[in-house]
Image: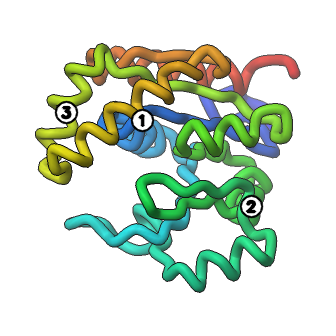
Amino acid sequence: MSSKQVLLGNCQRGHTFIVSAPAGTGKTTLVEMLTKEFDCVKMSISSTTRPKRPGEVDGVHYFFLSEEEFSAQVAAGEFLEHVTLFGYRYGTSRRAVEEIKAAGKHAILVIDTQGALHLMGKEKAVFIFLMPPSLEELGHRLMERGTETPESLSSRLSEAGREIAVATAYHYVIINDDLLTAYEVLRSIVIAEEHRVR
């Protein structure tokens, strides 16, 4: 522990923060804002079998794996959690999370509700759910991304309804109707949790 307290980054071993939200709610944007402000916060990069979207970089946004590579990592027990969503597989590397925390940094896992619910009670973590202002607004945001067909939009909104239904299982719920306000709430939670006497 450093002799001089700072706003964030006072611990020798970091904590785990799990952030979930329906697609299009802004979870990745908010977590990236946090990692840019604080060097002691690192986003754990998930692995996936889905194809890269334009602008995505392997090892930065995701580790893009073949079905065979993903299955081999599952069999080897390398994932803290793994799920299948919309026909693609996603997983969180156990080793990557441990390395972040061992370096005294906070690990932020951006994972879906299936993965988060699997980890509740198994992992010591702070669970944060980001809520869209409404399903209608979420639909507009997803359409603006330009990655959805009418069929996939309908599927994503149905899934969002299921995800929102389990939000109360989380420690915190943040409504992202204004990005800067949502960021201040997320930032405050992470700071407070580091300073909490466990």
The amino acid type found where label 3 is placed reads Arg
Identify which residue is drawn at 58% across, 22% down: 166
N-terminal label among 3 and 1: 3
Rendered location of residue 159, percent (x, y): 42, 35
Dot 3: within a 10 Å radius of its alpha carbon, few (fewer than 14), some, or many (20 or more) residues?
some
Q: Is residue 145 above or below residue 24?
A: below
Q: Quadrant of the N terminus?
A: top right
Q: Write down the residue under mark 2.
A: 94
- Circles 3 and 2: CB atoms closer than 8 Å: no
The amino acid type found where label 2 is placed reads Arg
Q: State the SS at label 2.
A: helix
Q: Write down the residue under mark 1.
A: 159
Rendered location of residue 147, percent (x, y): 18, 53
* Residue 157 visible in the shown view: yes
Q: Mark 3 vs mark 1: give the one in front.
A: 1
Q: State the SS at label 1.
A: helix
Identify which residue is drawn at 78% across, 18% down: 196
Dot 2: within a 10 Å radius of its alpha carbon, few (fewer than 14), some, or many (20 or more) residues?
some
Identify which residue is drawn at 72% across, 63% down: 79
Dot 1: within a 10 Å radius of its alpha carbon, few (fewer than 14), some, or many (20 or more) residues?
some
CA–CA distance in space, label 3 to label 1: 15 Å
The amino acid type found where label 1 is placed reads Glu
Q: Is residue 163 above or below residue 98?
A: above
* Residue 2 visible in the shown view: no
Q: Nearer the viewer, residue 78 or 149?
A: 149
Q: Write down the residue under mark 3.
A: 141
